[in-house]
Amino acid sequence: MTRGVVLLVDDVRQFRDGRRCIVARDPEEALIALRANRSVELAELWLDHDLGHDPDGRRRDVMPVVAELVRAAGEGAPYGIDRILIHSSNPAGALAIRRALEAAGYVVERHHAPIWRHEFRP
C-alpha cells in the first residue's frame, strides 16, 4: 500500500484494493487536483489516456494534464511526484504520454497489472 497522496486520472477505473486516492474523471478535474496538491509531493500519479467524452460528444484525453506537467518542468519547477504510472489501454496514447513526460525529465513507468475495478457511468 502506498503512503502519501495518490492521484488517479481515469474516467472509469478505480483501484480494486480500495487504496485511498484522489480520483479525477476528466482533464479539468485532474488539473484542479494536480494544482491543489502542488505544495505536497504526490506519491503516485496514475494516468489513463482516454477520458471519455465531453457533453458535446468530443473525446477527452489526459494531454492537458501532461502539458501542465511539461510546462512546469520547462519553467524549472517540475511537480514533485515520486512515481508516474501510465495504465492506458491505448498504446499510441500511452507512448505519447511517456515521450512527453520523459522529455521533460520525469521518470515514467508503464503499468499493465490487472488492479482495476471498473465503475461504468452512463
Image: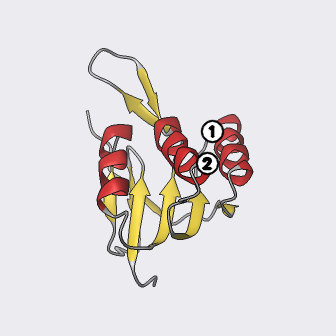
- Residue neighbourhood size for the residue with mark 1, other residues' Cα within 10 Å, grouped as few (<14), some (14–19), many (≥20): few
Residue 99 placement: quadrant: top right
Q: CA distance from mark 2 to mark 1?
A: 26 Å
Residue 84 image point, x, y percent: 58, 62
Residue 100 image point, x, y percent: 68, 44
Q: Is residue 118 left or right of residue 71?
A: left
Is there CB contact under 8 Å for labels 2 and 1? no
- Residue neighbourhood size for the residue with mark 2, other residues' Cα within 10 Å, grouped as few (<14), some (14–19), many (≥20): few
Q: Amino acid at mark 2?
A: Gly
Q: Is residue 81 left or right of residue 38?
A: right
Between 34 and 18, the one lying in front of the other is 34
Name the residue carrying label 2: 74
As helix, strand or loop, the secondary structure at mark 2 comes to helix
Is 28 above or below relative to 118? above
Between 119 and 9, the one lying in front of the other is 9
Name the residue carrying label 1: 90
Is 102 above or below relative to 66? below
As helix, strand or loop, the secondary structure at mark 1 comes to loop
Q: Quadrant of the N terminus?
A: bottom left
What residue is drawn where x is 61% and y is 48%?
A: 74
Which of the two discs, 2 and 1, sits closer to the camera?
2
